[in-house]
Amino acid sequence: MESGTLLYEGKAKKVFATPDPNQVVQYFKDDATAFNAEKRGTIFNKGIVNNKISVRLFRLLEDAGITTHFIEQLSDREMRTQHLKIIQIEVVVRNRATGSLVKRLGFEEGMVLDPPLVEFFYKNDPLGDPLITEDHIRLLQLATDMQVAQLRQSALRINEILTPFFKDKGMMLVDFKLEFGDSNGQLILADEISPDTCRFWDIQTGERMDKDRFRKDLGRIEETYQEVLKRVCA
Ligand code: UDP
């Protein structure tokens, strides 16, 4: 495929138009970035892994009653999705403290967060995706108060579905980031769910099984992405 007009190119994906204006094609690249794109690289076949994992997880969530933008898998690196207006908020759910939460507030690495913590970040590269409150969201007019409540509720529900799914695969879902679109007032889960957007720790060994291997130069990056795919699709 990869035929229609390129509508958007991000750090890890390209989005192409299709003959149907209500649908687009998401193409997953091997490019990897971290620390607000200060660190760049490629992870061999990451695009294939992330497309396939996202397909599996969108199907799982749809079966559990979550509305997603996923329509169908088109190829190793492509899925057809609904063409949505993306809400400029990154919704992060955390079951354990790590990453920016530890840096920002000094929590002990790995501390259990019960109930899970929900955070909102402003999707704005020049500003470095800053943490924002509900008052900021209102001021910036990124979403209505009702949508913010729905974002939180939906993110927590998705956590309840994904956490036992990954536990069954021997993986702890530590934290993850979601993006949503708006279709005539209805919130729809968009973007991707992959080792680029989640943190997974192996339950047996504690090994990092996600983009932290790239962020922190932990080695065995490609092998780990393949291992996640194997477990998710088993
Ligand atoms: N995350 C993401 N995209 C971003 C920022 C974060 O997918 O632009 C994911 C990240 O992979 C992790 C979770 O959101 O699973 C929480 O990330 P954190 O705020 O700890 O940020 P980081 O440590 O990556 O700066």
Image: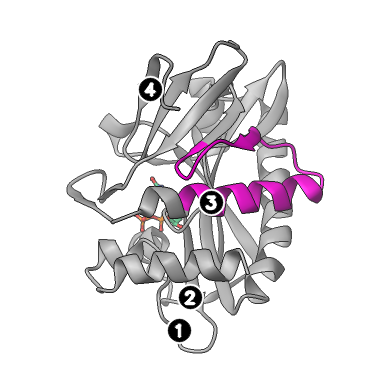
Q: Earlier in the sequence, mark 2 or mark 3?
A: 3
Q: Is residue 66 magenta-colored? A: yes
First along the sequence among labels 4 and 2? 4
Q: Which residue is mark 1?
A: 206
> Who comes first in sequence, dot 1 or dot 4?
4
Q: Amino acid at mark 4?
A: Tyr
Image quadrant where one finds the N terminus: top left
Residue 86, image x, y percentages:
53, 25
Residue 201: assigned label: 2
- Packing grade of label 4 (10 A; few <14, some 14-19, many >=20) is few
- Closer to the N terminus: mark 1 or mark 3? 3
Helix, strand or loop at label 4? It is: strand
Which residue, given by chain and number where applicable, does mark 4 sit on? 8
Whether residue 97 is visible to the viewer of this picture, yes or no, is no
Mark 2: secondary structure = strand
Position in image of residue 211 (x %, y %): 36, 61
User: Which of the image's four quarters has the C terminus?
Assistant: bottom right
Q: Is mark 1 within 8 Å of ligand 1?
A: no
Mark pair 4, 2: CA separation: 32 Å
* Front of the two marks 1 and 4: 4
- Residue flagged by tag 2: what amino acid is it? Trp
Q: Residue at x 64, y 36 (%)?
A: 72
CB of residue at label 3: within 8 Å of ligand 1? no
| Measured Cα–Cα span from mark 1 to mark 2 | 5 Å
Q: Earlier in the sequence, mark 4 or mark 3?
A: 4
| Residue designated by label 3 | 52
Q: Nearer the viewer, residue 14 or 88?
A: 14
Above or below residue 196? Residue 179 is above
Magenta span covers which residues?
50-78
Q: CA distance from mark 4 to mark 3?
A: 21 Å
Does 34 sit above or below residue 185?
Answer: below
**Local SS, label 3:** helix
